Amino acid sequence: MSVKDRMSGNEAVAYAIKQVNPDVMPAFPITPSTEIPQLVSNYIANNEMDTEFIPVESEHSSMSATIGAEAAGARSLTATSSCGLALMWEELLLAASNRMPCVLTLVNRTLSGPININCDHSDAMGARDTGWIQIFAESNQEAYDNFIQAYPIAEDKRVHLPVMICQDGFITSHAVQNIVLNEDEEVQDFVGEYHPEEFLLNDGNPIAIGPYSISSYAMEARKAQEMAMENSKEVIIEVARRYKEKFGRGFELFEEYKTEDADYIMVIMGSAAGTAKQAVDDLREKGMKVGVLKLRVFRPFPAEELAEALKNAKGIAIMERTESYNGHGGPLCSELRAALYEHKVYTEAVCYTYGLAGRDFTVEHVYDIFNEVNDIVVNGKEYKQHRYINLRTKEV
Amino acid sequence: MRTDVSKINETTPYEDLTEGLIMHAGGTAKEFKTGEWRTNTPVFYAEKCKQCLLCAPVCPDGCIPVKDGRRADFDYDHCKGCGICVKACPFGALAMVEGVEPIKEEGV
C-alpha cells in the first residue's frame, strides 16, 4: 500500500533516508541541501530512526567521515550542494577508488562565481570524473525513488562504487509537489540489510584500506575501477526494473517522451525536462513531431543506448546546464556528440546552454529551440553552437 | 572467499587484484624494508647501556626491540636513522654514524 502526500524534494529525500535508516550520516549544512540533514536530525531526535548523525565542521570532514564509517562496515551517506561538493573533491575520488558503496544526496546549485545560490549543474558536472555513479531527478517523486535505489546499486558486488543522487536546487528541493510514498517495510525489504564482505571492524579478519600503491599496481587498480563503472550500467537497469515491478514507477538509464516518431528530440537532465515535456505536448497539438529524452544516469554515460535512441531523429537539441569554459561546449554536449559520432549517428546536434545560476527556462524557450532546429534541418539555417538561452545580448 | 594477498605480485592481472587494492591481511608493513631509506644510522654500544629504556618509546618506527625488560640491537630493516633515540640516551650508549651501515667505532 502506497501513501499519497505532498512534499518538497528535500522532504522527500529525507523521508526516504528515514525509511532506509542507514547506519551513519555525517553532514554539514549548505543551501539548498541544508534541510536534508536538518530533517534527518529531527527524525533521529523523535526516535523515528536510529542513524548515527555526526555534526562535522566542514564538507571535507563530512565526506571523510562518510568514507571512514563505510570502511568500518556501516551503511553511510551525506548530503551537500555546490561549494560543499567542491570542498569534498579529494574525498570524492577516495570514496570511489577505495570502492566505498556510500551515498551522497546532492541538491544541485551553481558554483561560484559570481556567488549565487540557485540551480545549475556545475557542482555535479565538476565531479563527473571522480568515479561516482550520478543519477538525476526531474521531480520530487524521482528524487525519492532514486534514493531508494541508491544502495542496491552501490552495494551490488559487481559495482561497489559510491552513488550521487542529484536533484535541482530550489526547483525540486524546495517546491512542494504531490508524491506517492512507499510503505516503510516495503522500502526496507527492497533495500535489504547491509552485509559487507570486508570491513575494518571485522574482528579476526584484518584489512588495510587505501594503502599506498606503487606504479606496478596503480594503473591496474584504475582499470578495475573503470570496469566496475561499466558493470554498474546493467545493475542500474536491473534495480530500476525491480523498483518498477514493486512500486510501479521509474525509468532505467533515461526516459523517452514521445520520441518514437519524433523528427526533433531535446536531450535534457533534471527538472527542466518537465518544462520541455509541456512544450512538446503544445507543439504536437500544432502538428510538430517533437520529443524529449530525459537523461537519468549521467555516470556511467549510456553512450551506446543514447545513440540508438536518437538515431532516427533529424535534429537533436542538447541542453547544457553548466559552462565548461573550453570554447567547445559542456560535458553533456561533448560526450553525447562523441557518442553519436562513435556510433555513426550523423544527425544535426545543436548544443544550447540554459538555466545557469537559476535563470528561468520556460516552455516558450523550448518552442524557440525546436523551431530553430527545424529551421537548421529544413532550411539549412546557419547557427552558432553553445548559444545561451534567455541571455541579454547585443547580438542579433 | 578472501583473496590470499601473498599470492599477488607484479605479474598479477588487474582482474585478480583486490577491490581498491584493499589488503586482506594485517601487519604487512613489516615486509616492506624501509630501512634502506636511511642516510644516517644509529649504532648501539651494549656495554655502555644501563637498560634504562628511555630510547625504545621515543622511536617513531618501533625499531628498538624490547624483550623481558631489556633492549636488543636495532631493527635495521625499518630504522630510518632519525636520531631521536641517540638524543634520548643519557649514557652515550647510542651514536649516529654517516651512511646506511651501522659501523661501530673501535674503543668506544
Image: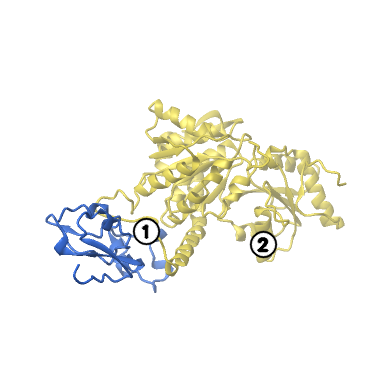
Chain colours: A yellow, B blue
Can you see residue A320?
yes
Q: Mark 2 lies on which chain?
A: A
On screen, residue B101 above or below A36? below
The residue lying toward the viewer, choosing from A78 and A193, is: A78
The residue lying toward the viewer, choosing from A143 and B84, is: B84
10 Å crowding of disc 2: few (<14), some (14-19), many (20+)? some
* Residues behind callouts 1 and 2 on a single chain: no
Indicate the position of residue A148 as horizontal and vertical percent values.
Answer: 47, 41
Q: Mark 2 points at which residue?
A: A338
The residue lying toward the viewer, choosing from A297 and A392, is: A392
Residue found 29% across the figure and 57% down from its top: B61
Q: Name the residue under label 1.
A: B22
Identity of the amino acid at label 1?
A: Ile
Q: Is residue B82 left or right of residue B51?
A: right
On screen, residue A202 above or below A278? below
- Numbered tag placed on residue A381 in the rendering: none
Residue found 70% across the figure and 41% down from its top: A355
Identity of the amino acid at label 2?
A: Ala
Indicate the position of residue A347 as horizontal and vertical percent values.
Answer: 74, 60
10 Å crowding of disc 1: few (<14), some (14-19), many (20+)? some
User: At numbered mark 1, what does the secondary structure look like: helix, strand or loop?
Assistant: loop
Alpha carbons under labels 1 and 2: distance apart: 35 Å
User: At numbered mark 2, what does the secondary structure look like: helix, strand or loop?
Assistant: helix
